[in-house]
Amino acid sequence: MKALSNVFLLAIFFSAPSPAMESADKIGHIQSVKGLASIVRNGAVLEGTAGAALYRGDLIRTGKPGAAGIVLTDDSSISLGSGSELALNNYAFEPKEGRFALALRMVKGTFSYITGQITRLAPDTAQVQTPDATIAVRGTKLLIQVKE
């Protein structure tokens, strides 16, 4: 029985992502939250709290009332208003390797986006998608409202 529990513990240890792996995949964090916010990650709904790590593929939702401030690793800043949904579809910020990508999908709600280093270093790699259009980001500030 003891051998079986040791095997089980080893299986958990080796299947869990290492902290180094998690930090490499982290693309940002929630800086602030007012009201309700959640993160949908791989089908699971997590509470969106200040300091929560964000990863490529996450969907951030704010409730009514609700608001959230997000900071990505390239210092991009995104504010979501009440009743908003934002998908972090693609993101890469690896200046030493020359890898840059930013694809945000604004599903609904109000958004303020202030560009970070990606748009300065590789402006052709930043896109903001809405239900009606894809916007190549060239400037430094963008305000969008997507109605349902």
Image (spheres, grey):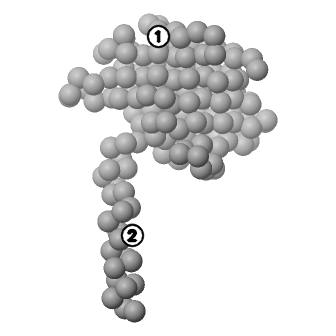
Residue visible at 69% across and 36% down in the picture:
62
Residue closest to the far left = 96
- Please rate how many residues cluster around mark 2, counting C-alpha atoms within 10 Å: few if below 14, some from 14 to 19, many from 20: few
Which disc number belongs to residue 137?
A: 1
Residue of label 2:
12
Q: Quadrant of residue 48?
A: top right
Report the number of numbered marks: 2
Instruction: Report x, y in % for residue 58.
Output: 53, 38
Relative horizontal placement of residue 83, taking residue 78 as reference (left or right) = right
Q: Quadrant of the C terminus?
A: top right
Can residue 31 be seen in the rendering of this structure?
A: no
Instruction: Report x, y in % for residue 102.
Output: 42, 22
Q: Nearer the viewer, residue 102 or 14?
A: 14
Residue 50 lies, with reference to residue 109, above or below; the image says below
Q: Nearer the viewer, residue 70 or 132?
A: 132
Instruction: Report x, y in % for residue 114.
Output: 51, 19
